[in-house]
Image (cartoon, grey):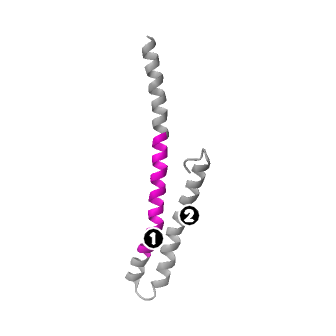
């Protein structure tokens, strides 16, 4: 679990779990509904049913990565300011 430091991190991680679950449930239920008729059709239908959950996972992972990048850039900016102050004192 990433982004565990605040409420936003909890919400994003919770929604990420929901997105993964909806992806698996959609694929499994659709596959099991159609596998008796035609196996290839069941695989294709399962892949299509996975798409909404997969898009949710990708969007949430992008949000997590962007937030981590922002936090890392804040740390680097702080260190660069400190380095600039120490070099100007000399």
Which residue is the extreme one toward the bottom? 37
Q: Classify residue 13 by image quadrant.
A: bottom right
Q: Which residues are magenta?
A: 46-70
Q: Which residue is mark 2?
A: 18
Frontmost residue, 79 versus 28: 79
Q: Classify residue 21 by image quadrant.
A: bottom right
Which secondary structure type mostly characterizes the magenta part of the structure?
A: helix
Q: Earlier in the sequence, mark 2 or mark 1?
A: 2
Task: Tell me which residue sits at (48%, 35%) in the image.
Answer: 74
Q: For residue 50, which numbered disc appears in the image?
A: 1
Q: Position of residue 31 (x, y in %)?
A: 47, 79
Q: Position of residue 25 (x, y in %)?
A: 53, 72
Q: Secondary structure at mark 2?
A: helix
- How would you rate the neighbour count of disc 2 (Cα within 10 Å): few for under 14, some for 14-19, many for 20 or more? some
Which residue is the extreme one toward the top? 90
Mark 2–mark 1 Cα distance, whole angstroms, equals 13 Å
Badge 2 vs badge 1, beta-carbon distance below 8 Å = no
Q: Is residue 8 above or below residue 56?
A: above
Name the quadrant of the C terminus. Answer: top left
Image side of residue 37 versus residue 11, left or right: left
Q: Position of residue 18 (x, y in %)?
A: 56, 63
- How would you rate the neighbour count of disc 1 (Cα within 10 Å): few for under 14, some for 14-19, many for 20 or more? many
Q: Position of residue 45 (x, y in %)?
A: 42, 78
Frontmost residue, 67 versus 17: 67
Which residue is the extreme one toward the right? 7
């Amino acid at each position: 679990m990433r982004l565990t430091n605040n409420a936003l991190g909890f919400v994003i991680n919770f929604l990420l779990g929901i997105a993964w679950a909806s992806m698996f449930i959609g694929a499994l239920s659709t596959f099991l509904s159609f596998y008796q008729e035609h196996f290839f059709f069941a695989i294709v239908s399962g892949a299509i049913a996975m798409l909404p959950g997969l898009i949710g996972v990708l969007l949430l992972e992008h949000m997590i990565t962007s937030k981590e990048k922002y936090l890392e850039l804040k740390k680097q900016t702080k260190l660069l300011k400190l380095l600039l102050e120490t070099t100007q004192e000399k």
